[in-house]
Image (cartoon, rainbow, N blue to C red):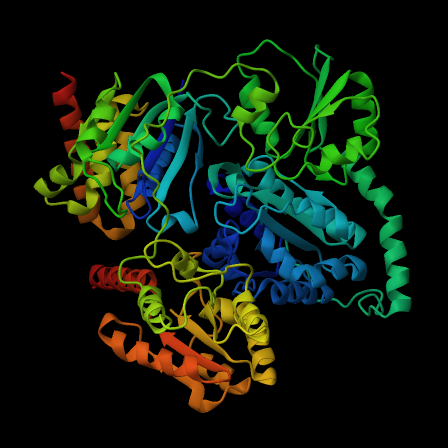
Amino acid sequence: MKSDILLAGVGGQGILSIAAVIGYAALNRNLNLKQAEVHGMSQRGGAVQSNLRISDEEISSDLIQSGMADLILSVEPMESLRYLPMLSENGWLVTNSKPYINIPDYPDIDSVYDEIKKLPNHIIIDADGIASEIKSRKSSNIVVLGAAIPFLPFEWEDYEFGINKLFGRKGEEIVQSNLEALKAGMEFCKTIKE
Amino acid sequence: MKNKLLLGDEALAQGVLDAGISGCYAYPGTPSTEIMEYIQNSKLAIERNVHRSWSTNEKTAMEAALGMSYAGKRAMVSMKHVGLNVASDAFMNSAITGVNGGLVVIVADDPSMHSSQNEQDSRFYGKFALIPIFEPSNQQEAYDMAYEAFDLSEKYQVPVMIRITTRLAHSRSGVYTKAVREMNQTKLPGDMRQFILLPSIARKRYKGLLSNQERFIFESEQSPYNKITEGSNKDLGIIACGLANNYLNESMKGTSQEYPILKISQYPVPVNMIRKFAASCKELLVLEEGYPIVEESLTGLLNMDYKVSGRLEGSLPLDGELNSDHVSRALGIELPASKEIPSLVANRPPTLCPGCGHTDVFLALNEALVTYGKGRVFSDIGCYTLGALDPLNAIDTCVDMGASVTMAVGAADAGLIPAVAMIGDSTFTHSGMTGLLDAVVKKSPITLIISDNATTAMTGGQNSAGTGSLEKICLGLGVDREHLIMMIPLRKNHDENVDIMKKELEYNGVSVIIAQRECVQTAARDKRIAAALKLKKVANT
C-alpha cells in the first residue's frame, strides 16, 4: 500500500493543518510517513505545496516523483493545476472551488474549472460555502480534506484521532466543528460520486 | 526508545538535547530556524535550563557556543548556509583552537534557493576548516548523528559539522530516540594555552589539526554511515552522498538493475573505501545534493581515463535541488508519463501581508523619491525584500545582511546623493549597526530607514535583539538627535511621513528614520495566544 499526496494552496490557507491531520491519521494506522513542508518566504501569500507520502513499506524520498502522485488535494482551484505534472495517470484531483485572488493576472475562473474538468478523475467542492453553511467558516480546508476521504487509506477513527491531536488544545468546540466539516466534505463527495 | 514524528530540524534538536548539551545558540534563518524553536519549547531543555535564547547574529552565536565549549560543556550552534559566512571567522578559528566540551555546528543549506540569496554548499566550509562533517540522509540519521557528533568532537577536541539541506530540514518522519545523557560539568581546558591563537600557538595547533586528518579519514572508513552495498552490475558504481541516497532508492525501485552503491554520509571522504569501490566498477556516477564537491575531488584537474559522471560532468543539473527525477534521467530510467502545467496557471510569488507596515513605508518612500528618480534604494534581507516586486517596485538591492547601509554609503561616496538604506530591525542589529557607525564617522549623505516591526518576521516572528532600544542604539552610534526621526507607518499618516522623508532626503548628512509598527502576523499570534490562555483560565475555574 502506498499513497502519495500533493497538497496545494496559498500561504496562510491552512494546508499544513491538513497535512498534520493526515500525518496523525497515518501514525494512528501505524503506517510510515514522510511529509515535506514549505516554510519561509513562500508562506507569505505565495504558492505553497506539501508532499505527503504514506506507505506500509519504508519510504525513501521525501519528494514524490513526477507522474506518481495518487492525489492532488488543493484548497484553491488554480493552485491544484500547478502540480499536474506530479499526478499519476489514474490519480484524483480534489479541489476547493473558491479562487484566492491576490495577483493581478489571475485567469478567468471558468477556464480554470474547464482545465480541471479535462481530467478523468476530479472533484470540485465549494468548501467555503459548505463551511459557512455549517457555521464553521474557518474549517474550509478540513471540508476539502473530507472530500478526499474516499481516496485515502484511513478509517474515520484515524481522522478523529488526528483532529483531536491537532485542535484538542483549542477546546472541544473547535474539535467538533472540524469533525463536522470533515463529515460535510465526505458527504458531498458521496453525493457526486454516486 | 520512543517513536516521534519529527522534522529533520527537530530530529537534530532532539538529538543534541538527548546528547546532554548545555547550550544552543542560533540566529533564525530558513531552513534552520526550527532547530532552535524546538529546543525552546522542549520540556527537557526547560527542565535542564539549557541555554536557548536567540543570538544577535550567527557570529555571536558561534562565539558563545565556543565559549561554552571552552568552559567544558557541550554546545550546539545552528544557522542557515549564508549565516555561516557571517560566523566564518569564529568557525574557521574554532578548528584551530579546538574544543573542550563537545561543539557541534549545524548548518542548513538551501539548494534551489527556496528562501535564500545563493545555494552555497557548506561541506566546502567543513573541508576548508579541516573538520569532520556528518550529512544525514534521513530524519533518523539526523537524530543519531546529532546524538553521536559530540563524542567525535570530544574524542579529537575538534568542532564537528552537521550539514543538512532544506528538504530534510522541513520534512517530517518517524524517529526513534535514545537514552538521555548527563550534561558535562564545568571544567577548564586541559591545555590552558589552546585557545590563545598567537601565531606561535596557532602554528602548533594547526599542525595538530593537520596531523588529525588521517584519523578523521579513518573514522569515516569505520563509520556505520558510510557503506558499500554490493551489486551485480559492475559497469557502473554509484556514489550517493547524504540525501541523494533516498532519491537513488526511489529511482531504482521497480527496476531490475543492481549497481554497487557507496553511500557517503560522513566526511572527510573515506579514501580507501572509494579506491576499493572504484577499482571494482568500470565507471562512477556521483550523486550529491549541492555542489559537485565529491565528484570534483575524484576527477581532479587531470581527469584520468576513469570515467566519473555527475553534476560537474553534466549527467545531472549543476544547480538546484536534487530529486529522483534527475537521478532517474542520469541512470537512463524511464519516468512515468506526466501532464503539463496548463498555460493559464499564473505565477503567485509571495507578497507582503495585507496591512503590513513595510507597505506603508514603501508607499511613502516611493512618493518622497519621485523628484530624485529611481535607483537609489539599497535594501536588505527580510520580508521587506518583497518590496522589490510589483506593484511597489520600491527597492534596488538585496545582497547580504546589513549591506543596505554600507552599499548606500559607498554609492553616496560615488556621488549618488541622496542614497537611501532600507533595513528591518532584526537585520539592523544583526549586521547594520557597524555600517551605520561608518556612515556617522564619514558624515555620509544617506537616509537610513529602519522599518521596525519588533520581530524577526520572515522566519516566523522570533525575538528581535533591538526591540525597544533602536533609538538609543542609533544615538549611541553618534546619529544627530535632530536627524533621528520616529514615525508610524499607517495609511492615515502617509502625507506626514512623505514630508518627513523628503526633508531628511534633503539633509546632507546621516539621517535615520525609525518607522515603528508591530508585525501583523505576530500581533495576530499574540492575540490567539491570549485567547487560548483565557480559555484555559475559564476551564480551570
When the figure is inspected, residue B65 is found, relative to residue B312, above or below; the finding is: below
What is the total number of numbered labels drawn onto the structure image? 0
Of the pair B503 and B327, the residue shown nearer to us? B503
Q: Position of residue A135 (x, y in %)?
A: 10, 45
Residue B527 at least partly seen: yes
From the viewer's side, name the closer residue of B114 and B48: B114
Compared with residue B368, is residue B210 higher up or lower down, i.e. above or below? above
Q: Is residue B60 left or right of residue B217?
A: left
* In the displayed structure image, the side of residue B14 where residue B239 appears, left or right: right
Q: Residue B492's quadrant in the figure?
A: bottom left
Residue at 65% across, 47% down = B122
* Residue B231 located left or right of residue B436: right
Q: Quadrant of residue B288?
A: top right
In percent of the image, x 79 and y 39: which residue is there?
B219
Q: What is the x, y in percent for residue B271?
A: 82, 33
Q: Position of residue B70 (x, y in %)?
A: 73, 66
Q: Is residue B72 visible?
A: no
Query: Which x, y percent locates residue B480?
Result: 49, 89
Q: Quadrant of the C terminus of chain A?
A: top left
Viewport quadrant of the N terminus of chain A: top left
Quarter of the figure with residue B96: bottom right
From the viewer's perspective, is B442 left or right of B275? Answer: left
